[in-house]
Image (tube, rainbow, N blue to C red):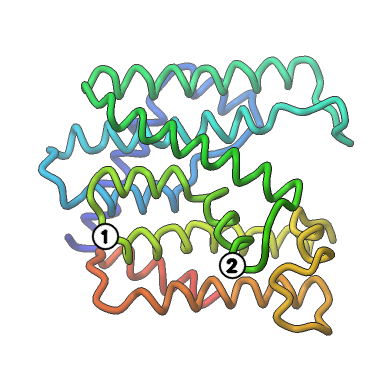
Amino acid sequence: MSYQGGVAQLKQVEALVLDQTAYRFLGDNFAGPKMDKDQMLWLHEAIKGTNLDDKVAHQVIGATLYVILAHDTHDGIDEPSDAIQKTLQERQLTVLAGDFYSSLYYRALSGLGMIDLLAALQSGVQETNEAKVNLYQLHITGDEDYLTHLIMSKAAIFSRFATYFDCDEAFISVGAHAILLTHLLAERKNWLFSNHSLFQAAYEHGYMALNVQADFAVWLDDLIVTVKAEIKANMGGLAISEMMEERLKELLGQ
């Protein structure tokens, strides 16, 4: 498929997700997580080789994006110990949004008769939550384990999706590392802007300390370099679209 053709298909998927009255209301009133377009791109890559027609494939991708939105939204419900507390309206909207996204993906996948995929995605949500807890509590045995948990915390749902559609291990590895890379690059921007990062605890604990003299900014750059190297190591012979190749080049160049 050409680059232009791929972009057109992804716009159709995005339009399908956005074409909900409640979604538009939440978009105007709820400052929660937004649709992850890199995940959408990788989901599209994972499903494109199947025998599903485009309409059904778009519905499946849309439903999976709702799984991700539901998880990320519920993950944003604050705890009493959080430094910044949401207002009552913000809290109510967060719960409403998470429940809304959950109802959409249940309805979509149940309507398509894809109960097995629904179960696979739920396993991905569980793995995501477990990885986040272990990262937060630093229940990690070493650098390799830290990176594995970091990938799972961002890409377990994609990995379960891709496995369900029989994608090979190299494709899943590159996709999962690329999804993580987008988050690491965003985190680096956030650090430069706010001088605050969720990764500081891991740095202080000594994980991924490739350069023992590094300050946090260098440590984060080293982690980004490590993830890029993993992507490059598995890209040889990978069957991906022109659009995906362009996106990977863009990410690896940052």
Residue 147 x %, y %: 59, 63
Of the 4 image quadrants, the one containing the N terminus is bottom left
Question: Residue at point 44% right, 42% down?
Answer: 157
Residue 86 x %, y %: 80, 25
Question: Residue at point 40% right, 35% down?
Answer: 121
> Could you tell me which secondary element the residue under label 1 belongs to?
loop
Mark closest to the chain's N terminus, 2 or 1: 2
Q: Residues within 10 Å of mark 1 (few under 14, many from 20)?
A: few
Looking at the image, residue 229 lies above or below residue 248? below
User: Could you tell whether 86 is left or right of 43 in the image?
Assistant: right
Question: Residue at point 49% right, 75% down?
Answer: 252
User: Could you tell whether 2 is left or right of 121 in the image?
Assistant: left
* Residue kind at label 1, given as amino acid type: Asp
Q: Which residue is mark 2?
A: 144
User: Could you tell whether 208 is left or right of 162 in the image?
Assistant: right
Of the 4 image quadrants, the one containing the C terminus is bottom right
Looking at the image, residue 194 lies above or below residue 217? above
Between 203 and 27, which is closer to the camera in this rendering?
A: 203
Q: Which residue is mark 1?
A: 168
Could you tell me how many numbered marks the image carries?
2
Q: Quadrant of residue 221?
A: bottom right
User: Could you tell whether 200 is left or right of 123 in the image?
Assistant: right
Residue 139 x %, y %: 71, 51
> Could you tell me which secondary element the residue under label 2 belongs to?
helix
Between 1 and 108, which is closer to the camera in this rendering?
A: 108
Residue 194 x %, y %: 83, 57
